[in-house]
Amino acid sequence: MSVELEDEKHAYNALFVDFMYLLRDYGIPTNLKDLLELNRGIEQGLAKTLDELFVFSRLVFVRRVEHMDAFERAFAFYFYDIDIPAVEEGDMSLLRTKAFRDWLNKAIENGELPARAKWDMSPEELMKKFWERLREQTKEHNGGNKWIGTKGNSPFGHSGNSEGGVRVGGGAGNGTALKVIGDRRFISYSHSNKLRADNLRQALESMKHLKHAGAHTDLDLKDTIYKTTRNGGEIELVFKRELRDRMNLVLLIDNGGYSMTPYVDITRLLFSKLKDRFENITTYYFHNAIYDKVYVDQRRIRSYSTEKLLLQKADTRVVVVGDATMAPEELLSPFGSISGFDLSDSRASIQWMRLIANRFKYNTWLNPIPRERWGGNYGATTLKAIREVFHMEDLTLGGVKGMVEHLSNKTGKED
Amino acid sequence: MSTDNLEFKGSDQYYLDPELGSIVNIALQMEKPLLLTGEAGTGKTQLAIQVAKALDMDIEILRCKSTIKGEEACYNQDTVLRLNDARFGAGDTGRVVDNFYDYVVWGPIGRAFRADRKRVLLLDEVDKTESDVQDNLLDILEDFEFTIREVNETIKADVKPVIIITSNAKRELSDPFLRRCFCHHIAFPTPDQMTEILKLHYPDTSPELMEAARDIFFDLRDRGFEKPPATSELINWVGALERLGEMPDPKNPPLTGVLLKRASDIQAYRGEEGPKRYL
C-alpha cells in the first residue's frame, strides 16, 4: 500500500502507489510527480473525505477529457470494489467483458438469476439486469467493501490518527463521488467510443490538426528590401505566412450492404464539416471491394474509372470507409466482383487496392468494426489482407485521431 | 503567503456547480494553474471573472490570438518611443533613454507577476496560440517567472497570481502544458443546472415560462444542428420571450432566430422534417 519516498524535505510514506499503477493499467498516463502532488495535497488536508479525494485525485491524475471515464472506473474499482466495464449501456460488446461474465457466474451461483439464465434469457435481458445491478451498487453503496473497516493497513480510518489520512463514512454528503461515477458523464469522450453525432465535435477538433496554414515565419526578402530602402536604410523585416498547399481528399465509401448504412452518413458528415481544410473533397462509392470502377452516386449507377482516380496528385489523402468484410474470393481472385460480371476487368480487388495505396501513400482505411474484433470474426481473412495494404483505424475517436496523424505527414518530409 | 483564507463560493450572478467550486478551491490552495476546457457557453471565462470578484482581486486578462508570440503577453519594449527619444530627446517626460525599463510596457502576465497584491490572471482561449507559444508559457506556469531578453533579467512573481486558463480545444494542448495545470472539463449544464442559471439571470420570470423554454432548448440541442444553441442563446431567448409575453408553443416556438444562427440550421429547422439525426 505505501512506499517510502524521499523528496527534498523529508522522507515519508506515499499513499496510493498502487492506485497510480492501477490508473496506468486503465490507460491513464500518470507518474511519480503526480503521486507526490497527491500526497502533498492530502497532507494539506485537501482530501478529508472520499468524495474530496475523488475530486482531488482526478485533478491530479487526469488531464485529458478522454481519460475521465477510465479514471472514474478505476476509482470505483479501487475504492468501492465495483468493476464498471468500459462499454456504454446498450452496447452488445458488454457480453465479452470480464466484468459481465464474472457478474453472470456469480449471480447464477448465489441464486440471483435462475440456473439456466445463460440459455433461457436473451442477451438483452441479461445486459439490462447487469446495468440495473450496477446502478443499484453505485446509488446505495453502503460500505462493506475492501476499504471501509480495514483499520490496520488502510489509509482510511474513522478513529485515531487521521492526520493526513482520509476519513470514510460518517461525514455528511458522503457518497457523492460514487453517484457521480455512476452517471458516467464522460463516456462519450472516451477514446474507445464509437463516433456519433454527439461526440462528432470532439473528432472534428482532432481533425483540425490537418490544417496546414503556416505561421508568419518566412522572410519576405523582396518586401524587406523595398521597405528598408523606403525607410532610408533602417532595416525593416517583413515576414509572410509560410505557404503550405491545401490538401486534396478522396473519400471511398463502401455503401453496399445494410451493415454499412449507419456509418455512411456519419463519415460524410465528418468530412463535409472539414471542407475548408481541404482544397477538394470527392466521394466515391463501392460495394465491398474496389475493382476497375468506383461510383459517383450512392446508388452506384454513374461509374468513374479507378484508373482515372489513380491519376490524381500523389499527395492526395485517401480515406476508405468500409468494414473490409467480404467473401475472400471477392477480394483475392480475379473476376471476383459479385455485382455484375465484367470480362474486361481481370484484376483482383486486392491488386486495385494495392495500386491505390501505392499511389497515395497518405491513406487510411476507417473500419466501423472495433479494433479488438478485427482478429476473430467472419471477415478476418479479408480484413487482414487489406490491413497489409492500407493503414487501418477503427471508427472511434481514437481511430480518427490515429488517422489524422497518419494523414498529416508528421515526419515532415515533402513530396 | 498563506492562502487558507481564500475560498470561492460562487456569486449572485454566477451559478457555481459544487464540484467545480471545490476544484477552484483546490487549485487556489495548491497554487497551480487551472485549465478549463469545455464547449462554448459553459461559463469558463465567466468563472475567472467571478473568482476575481468574489475574492476581491484585480484581474489581468490575456485574450489569446493566433498571432500572439508569447513575449508581448509578458512585456513589450516601446522601441519606437525609445528611438524617438534618442533622436529628439525625451523632453520633460522624465524618461531616460539609457534606462530600459522606462520603455517597457507590461503585458497582462507582467502586470500580474509584478503586482503587490494577489491577482487573477486569465489566459483566455489559450488553444488559439501557436504551439511554440504554449511552450514559452511553460516556465511561466511552472515557476511563475519570465526573462526579459533585452537585459537578461528575470521577473519572478513575489505574490503568485491565481492563474486560470480556458481552452475551447480548437487545437490540442501539448502534454507538458497539461502537466503543469489542473485540468477540468466543464460538461454542458444539465437541465436542472440550467434552471439554476436561468433563475440567476431572471429572478422574476415565471418558472413555467423558463421550464418550457428550457425544454424546447434541450430538444433543439438534441436535433444535431451544425451549431447547437448554447447557454447564452437560451438566456437571450428567455429574455426575448418574456418581452413577448406569451408561453412558447413547443410545436412552433417563436423567435427561433435567437437560438439558431447558421443559415443551414434555420433552413433545416423550417423544413418539415428537421435536420437528419445521426444514430
Image: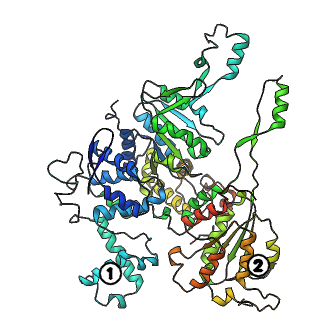
Compute the Cα span from label 2 to label 1. Answer: 48 Å
Q: State which quarter of the image contains the N terminus of chain A.
A: bottom left
- The amino acid pointed to by label 2 is Tyr
Nearer to me, B251 or A184: A184
Q: Quadrant of residue B250?
A: bottom right
Q: Is residue B115 visible?
A: yes
Earlier residue among tags 2 and 1? 1
Going 48% across and 29% down the picture, which residue do you hit? B113
Q: Quadrant of residue A365?
A: bottom right
Q: Is residue A298 left or right of residue A393?
A: right
Whole-percent x, y for residue A216 in the image: 71, 41
Up the image or down, B249 lies above or below A358; here it is above
For numbered disc 1, what is the local secondary structure? helix
Nearer to me, B132 or B120: B132
Going 48% across and 25% down the picture, which residue do you hit? B114
Going 51% across and 83% down the picture, which residue do you hit? A376
Whole-percent x, y for residue B240 in the image: 56, 48
Nearer to me, B11 or A49: A49
- The amino acid pointed to by label 1 is Leu
The dot on residue A295 is 2
Q: Is residue B250 visible?
A: no
Image color mode: rainbow
Instruction: Find disc 1 in the rendering and name its residue.
Output: A104
Whole-percent x, y for residue B132 in the image: 60, 43
